[in-house]
Image (spheres, rainbow, N blue to C red):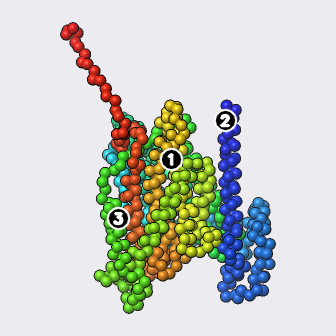
Amino acid sequence: MTGVPTARPASAALTALWRLTLAGLLVCLVGLLPWLSRTDPALTVLKARSAERDPTPEALAAVRDQLGLDAGPFRLLGDWLGALAQGDAGHSWISGSAVLPAVGQALGVSLLLMAGAMVVALSTAAAVCARPLWLGARRRLGSPRAGGTAAMLAALPEFLTASVLATVVGVQLGWLPALGWYGPRWMVLPSLALGLPAGALLGRLLADALPGVLAQPWASAAAARGLSGRRVARQALRHCVPGLLPNLGLFVVGLTGGAVAVEQIFDIPGLGRLTLEAATAQDLPVLQAGTLALVLLAAVAGGLARAAARLLLGPALRDGAVQSPPRPAPPGRRTAPLVYGALLVAVVAFGLARDPLGLDTAARLAAPSWEHPFGTDALGRDVLARVAHGALGTLAVALAVSAAALVAGVLLGLVPRVSGAVVDTVNAVPPVLAGLLVAGIAGSGPATPALAVAAVAWAPLAAHAGALLERERAATHITATRALGASEAYVLRRELLPAVVPPVLRHALLRLPGVALALAALGFLGLGAQPPSPEWGLLLAENLPYAERAPWSVLAPAAVLALLGALAVTAAGGVRLPRYARGRGQGPGWRARTDVPTPRRRRPEPRRHATEE
């Protein structure tokens, strides 16, 4: 027993060392970005300082001498780390101002925006799962129902939502300010743009977990004792939330560093925008300090989320007495996925017969008609044709990236002690910065957006898999199975994976539109496909300046993205493994196995009355 108390501090020390190593590797990789991209940092800095100045050899030599670029990247990185250990992150290569005050101010703005977005996200998630929770608390929920409205809301691009809110609510109606960051009123529109999609996704994940939790024996016992539906719903949320808290921590960091497009549209001086501008100008001190701030924020948010999950589960997690929800049975036939899929196929089929590159200058920004059902863009090209031809590439890449993220997420979720720090570190990297790093290492090309999104898309799935696995390993039936002599391989193959893989697979399907959105966001910011490609992100970026004059040019690709989200959510509701090992409690979603023969019981003979004897 003497070794037990020292095991936890040793494990915590190793975890902290692993996190510190990963953070150092990321900061070093960011510091090598100019040399990895094979560009001259002196030229980039000179252009960022003054675009009109000619890059003469004398001017470039002066910049190199001022910044010490001739010493090499490793010497620069070592000097910066040494100064950082003394509390000095250096000065900006562009403006010459101190880095720490600028990064601290930008971090404060991003945290304030994140708080507003989280309020919107939690309110949206509560609205999405309110009906399943209300029905389930009253024992009237048979199986989860996928919400098409929430799916379409989750599939809306954040930059598109931000642009529409800024144009309509801020400019045309004048209800709220659309630019700047001067007070609480300036928070409303960007918080809505960030919080609505995130809240819709969180609500769908919570609604997916509710039926299994409400099918546990405690829910039936509570209903039999006459407890109110409110108390049953509160306990159901307490059972569901621990599995989603790691993803909530990831959302916190994503809403802070990943809100680059929204910060640009609303002109918000946040950390994501500061980091992107520093990466574009190769301002290494600002870029390294901003990245380190995001990594620290990710570590704090992830640690708090995991601690809150363990606190909610209580001593049952330590004692192996967690009640595992029964595995739901496959739902009945649903027509919603067929309807959404048929609509998507019809749009693509009708558009493939048209020319996506044909120009008609006489019909620029033409309204929808029989000749052009989705209208035309600023060059007179048919929007339906471009949406349909762009769907093939966008959907193929999104499916490939989602499949790779699912495999990586499940495999890394099986080793949470190793993957936990990796998930927090990777999640701290905004997709735009990941795109720049991938472009610097692998070079610019059509595969750069896919590699950048794939590098960060597995993190939420790994966090979800790790949280489910930790709870499943502490379940009572796992403890009983091990007590009967089952091997770890048997427990993993027959108990853990069948319980973990289906929810994570449904989660991956729910994130399929998000992967397409990430690819579209990179295209919107100029890191994806280039004209005249009909990729969806490029379509939105090209037509967004004409949204007020010709809204159909933007609404058409946005509607197809929303249709993809509705298809993914409704299809995800029917994802189950074909084999169900054992029922855990005979709730409304549990079905017994049919491949195990049931032994026949002898009918007891009727007891004779004493008078008959």
Describe the element under mark 1 as helix, strand or loop: helix
Specify the label residue 468 is tagged with.
1
Asked if residue 232 can be seen in this view, the reply is no
Work out whether 437 lies above or below 581. below
Please tell me in which quadrant of the rendered image residue 301 appears: bottom right
Q: Position of residue 328 (x, y in %)?
A: 38, 46
Mark 3 → mark 1, Cα distance in angstroms: 30 Å
Q: Give the amino acid type for the residue marked by disc 2 in the picture.
A: Val
Q: Give the crowd class for mark 2: few <14, some 14-19, many >=20 residues within 10 Å.
A: few
Q: Position of residue 236 (x, y in %)?
A: 43, 44
Identify the residue under disc 2: 4
Q: Residue at x 59, y 67 (%)?
A: 434
Q: Give the crowd class for mark 3: few <14, some 14-19, many >=20 residues within 10 Å.
A: some
Q: Residue at x 50, y 37 (%)?
A: 478
Mark 1 → mark 2, Cα distance in angstroms: 25 Å
Mark 1 or mark 2: which comes first in sequence? 2
Describe the element under mark 2 as helix, strand or loop: helix
Q: Give the crowd class for mark 1: few <14, some 14-19, many >=20 residues within 10 Å.
A: many
Label 3–label 2 contact, CB within 8 A? no
